[in-house]
Image: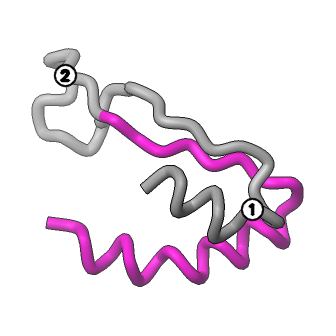
Amino acid sequence: MLFYLQRRFESQLKSCDVINKEDLELVNHLSGKKGRFVKLSFKNTVDLQDVKMTLAPIVEQNKV
C-alpha cells in the first residue's frame, strides 16, 4: 500500500512513512495497544487537499 501511495501521488507527497502509535479512538485506548498508521507529509496545503479528496471516500468504505 505504501508503494502505491508513493507512486500515485509522487508529485504531491513529500514523504510517506508507516508509524506505530496508540489508537485514541479505541474504547480502551489507555491499554497501550499500538496500531500501524500511514503518515503522509505534503509539500503544501493544496496538495494535501487534493490527496484528501481522492482518499476520503476510500477510507470511508474501509472503516469497520
Mark 2 or mark 1, whichever is nearer to me: 1
Q: Residue at x 14, y 17 (%)?
A: 31
Residue tagged by mark 1?
A: 10
Q: Main secondary structure of the magenta part?
A: helix
Q: Find residue 26 and report its image quarter.
A: top left
Quadrant in the rendering for residue 37: top left
Q: Residue at x 62, y 49 (%)?
A: 40
Asked whether residue 16 is drawn in magenta, I would say no
Where's residue 58, x and y in %?
A: 38, 78
Name the element at disc 1: loop
Q: Amino acid at mark 2?
A: Lys
Q: SS at mark 2?
A: loop
Q: Would you place residue 14 above or below residue 6 in this image?
A: above
C-alpha distance separating marks 2 and 1:
32 Å
> Which amino acid, mark 1?
Glu
Looking at the rendering, the stretch of residues picked out in magenta corresponds to: 36-64
The residue that mark 2 highlights is 33
Q: Which residue is rendered at x = 27% and y = 79% of the image? A: 61
Q: Earlier in the sequence, mark 2 or mark 1?
A: 1
User: Horizontally, is 2 left or right of 40 in the view?
Assistant: left
Camera-side residue: 19 or 7? 7
Q: Position of residue 64 (x, y in %)?
A: 13, 66
**Image marks 2 and 1: residues in contact by CB distance under 8 Å:** no
